Amino acid sequence: MHVLLVEDDAVLADGLSRTLQGHGMQVELATDGLQADAQLQRNPPQVAVLDIGLPGIDGFEVVRRLRGRGDSTPVLLLTARDAIEDRVRGLELGADDYLVKPFATPELVARIRALARRNAPKTGILTLGNLVFDSGARRARIGAQPLELSAREWAVLEYLLQQAGRVVSKQQIVDTIAPWGEDLTLNAVEVYVSRLRLKLDGAGLALRTIRGFGYLLEAAPAA
Amino acid sequence: MSSIRGRLLRWLVGPILVVNLGAAALTYLLAWTPAQLAFDEGLRTNAAALASRVRVGGAPVLSTVPADDGAGESNWAALHDARGRFIAGAPQLPGALHAGMRDARLDGEQVRIAVAEVAGTDGLRVSVARTVRARQQVRSAILRSLVLLEVLFSLALVGLVWFSAGNGLAPLARLRARLDARGSSDLAPLDDAGMPRELVPVVDAFNALLGRIDLGARAQDEFRANVAHQLRTPLAGLRLQLEWLAARHAGDRDSARSVALMLQANERMIRQTNQLLSLERAEPNRFARARLAPLDLSALVAESVQAFVEQAAVRHIDLGFELASASVDGDRFLLRDLVDNLVDNALRYTPPGGRVTVGCAALPGGGSLLRVEDNGPGIPARLRGQVFERFVRLDVGTHGSGLGLAIVRDIAKLHGAQLALGDADGGGAVFTVTFP
């Protein structure tokens, strides 16, 4: 995944680059607003991670110019300020997400991935642990072992994989896989998840229940 | 408190009443004097007529005068010699030593006496006395009317001053209405168009004050933003660098331990910075500028679930939720601070393996409830008053800032919410925030 990182603080920029690279992303770095603006035009990334407080033109202006060109590259804004106006303004200008420094690394990575997926074609292959999940071909396997899933189970797992590393509520699952008011209860979601948990045994995944709320799918920590 | 209307009344009504009294006295004199003169003239004429009819030569004889002249007054006449000795007529009339008018009392009644000399004699004088009943009636009628008029006039004057003072103060009332109608964060200068000339300096001074306040507020915001940026950016960089180092040296026990401690210290600095900033954000004078909007508590908690779950996982705590839709009017960022701090507090003071449950619900009688329950050691009743104070930490072994619950208290107070601390079933603490 190609990420453009725009951050003027050298320590943070270096740390972010290495962290994102460690998560398999190709990171291109810009240290001021004008440079970012130029790089966004020359070599559009899959996701732009953009600090607001930049020398030259600030992050807001970069987003404004980007959207002004009709460019829909997903933008994640980083800011040290939590002033209400900043948050609202960033999103109004067309940024897609917003994270206040200092952020937790898994949160940052999960959000960047979520933004990349939003724009990615639906045919992508998702992998987590030993699970390989091919949305386009509608085939999944654990290692070499094919995984048989019902349509509902497939939809639930696909959503959980898309949101891997993030807590999703049962209501979110219902809203995503049955968006047209189809009859799907929260209890039914629990049934699908417990079946998935059995079927995913040995996939190197942890599908945790967040009591009273929802689920969190992540790669099982190496034992 | 002194009132402008009161001052105007005091300073206008007193002097005007004095002037009125003077005018009334003058009116009385003007009305009374001609009546007195006419009466005296009549009496003098009578005395002169009687004197002209005194027969001289031999014993002087005084014509009789009717005791009752048909006008309701009694009359007396007497003749005295030059030394005032009684010669004829009504003996009760005192002797007169010279001609002219005077007042006296006769038979217990006020009379007016006119004395005339009898021409061609060596000092015989005729005195004519007449009661002044009608005159006294006239005088008291004049006085009564004047007093009545004076009272009516004074009352009218007080009323007039009262209403015109109110009318004159109307621009002040309009100014106050305009100030009252302002949004709580509106520091824009007042428009002095249409203001009376006398109020313009006040409005100008007020605008200057507003300007200074606005400048101060902006400087404070800017300072806050700078502090936030200058502290958070290096802390974020440090965290990532340390995490990278931790991953790289995971195999080296001593290095890993050292890096883990550095990460812990870094986390504490991050938390402390965030706490100080959010404490500042919860300042009542900042809150006045915050926006209140209807929010759903369950959605608000859901926004923070990710961070809670990560923190709970690190501490091996079973974190659960019981969220039902619950509407409150609040500031979304302050309420997130409130929820974050309550949950953080519970996760921090519950031992590993413990259980924390975050719940919210609408109350049957209106209002909403937020509830954070743990099964940790609980808080002894005698210490419950203290935990909401700043920098109070009950467990010195735990790394806390001592600010979290103070922030919760401040934010709850700003939202008019009741904050309570009780015992959970089977030990542990329950914090409840009841929103109106």
Image (cartoon, coloured by chain):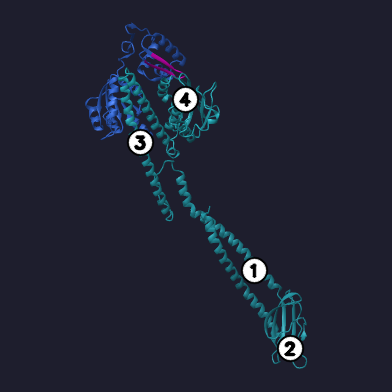
- Residue B399, above or below B290: above
Residue contact at pointers 1 and 4, CB within 8 angstroms: no
The residue type indicated by label 4 comes to: Tyr
The residue carrying pointer 3 sits among few (fewer than 14), some (14 to 19) or many (20 or more) residues within 10 Å by Cα, namely some
Residue placed most toward the observer, A220 or A200: A220
Query: What amino acid type is highlighted by mark number 2?
Result: Asp
Q: Which residue is mark 2?
A: B81
Quick check: do tags 1 and 4 share a chain? yes
Query: Over which residues does the magenta segment extend?
Result: A206-219
**Where in the figure is residue A133, as x and y percent of width and height?**
33, 12
Q: Indicate the colour of chain A.
A: blue
Q: Residue B151's quadrant in the figure?
A: bottom right
Could you tell me which secondary element the residue under label 1 belongs to?
helix
Chain identity for the colour cyan used in the image: B
Residue B349 is marked as: 4
Q: Nearer the viewer, residue A114 or B285?
A: B285
Sequence-wise first label, 1 or 2: 2
Q: Is residue B207 magenta?
A: no
> Could you say where residue B421 lies in the image, as x and y percent from the top left?
52, 29
Alpha carbon distance from label 1 to label 4:
94 Å
Residue under label 3, please give it.
Answer: B227
Say what amino acid the circle numbered 1 marks: Ile
Examine the rendering and report whether any part of residue A71 can be seen.
Answer: no
* First of labels 1, 4 by sequence position: 1
